[in-house]
Amino acid sequence: MEPQVGLLPWRITPIRPEDRADVHRLFAACSVASVRHRFRAPLPAFPARHLDELLAGPPERHDALAVRAGASRELVALGSLALPYGPTDGGTAELGLLVVDAWQRRGLGRALTAALIERAACRGVTRIVAEVEHGRGRLLTALTRGLTLVRRTVDRDGLTGIYAIPDGPFADPAARPPVYRLEP
């Protein structure tokens, strides 16, 4: 009998260049709907250019974290913050998440978001932007809990939220509370 997914231990780790095959396996394990929610299109494979940036980009430009689960440390989720969001804005990073279907609704996306925000705050990032399709506003709210909404827009493609990263605890690493857990 295999253990239930929710009971397996998981750990957040930085993504590494040697994780390319694991990212392809993660993508293959996701449903068409999950891929469409993440990339806004039904893609046949993880976009090559985006993967190259994830694996090679320095955290100051494209920070990426992975969630590995179970004894095999299988890659089950991927989160990233990419800078700059706009051509003239060096302080806003775009949030992207992809979680294997069996691991969704278990707090991995929220944990990845919190870890990425903590790392970004240490590098001087002041805002994040996140986009979701229509009907997925609750996901946006759950992922950005604790952040201050700066602006929320709705267009034909979906909802976009821009959130301020708080000052305070993030400014002083010694005073920073743990905002994510490495093991459940």
Image (tube, rainbow, N blue to C red):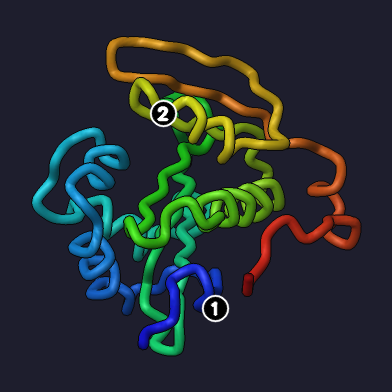
Horizontal arrangement in the rendering, residue 130 relative to residue 34 (left or right): right
Counting from the top left corner in percent of width and height, residue 150 is at 64, 18
Dot 1 corresponds to which residue? Answer: 9
Q: Amino acid at mark 2?
A: Arg
Quarter the N terminus occupies: bottom left
Q: Nearer the viewer, residue 128 or 29?
A: 29
Q: Are marks 1 and 2 in contact (CB under 8 Å)?
A: no
Residue 182: mark in rendering? none
Counting from the top left corner in percent of width and height, residue 86 is at 43, 26
Residue at 90 percent of width and 56 percent of height: 175
Q: Amino acid at mark 1?
A: Pro
Furthest residue toward left: 44
Horizontal arrangement in the rendering, residue 26 relative to residue 95 (left or right): left
Q: Residues within 10 Å of mark 2 (few under 14, many from 20)?
A: few
Residue at 56 percent of width and 40 percent of height: 143
Residue 136: mark in rendering? 2
Q: Residues within 10 Å of mark 1 (few under 14, many from 20)?
A: some
Counting from the top left corner in percent of width and height, residue 69 is at 45, 76
Q: Is residue 21 above or below residue 71?
A: above
Residue at 35 percent of width and 10 percent of height: 155
Quarter the C terminus occupies: bottom right
> Secondary structure under badge 1?
loop
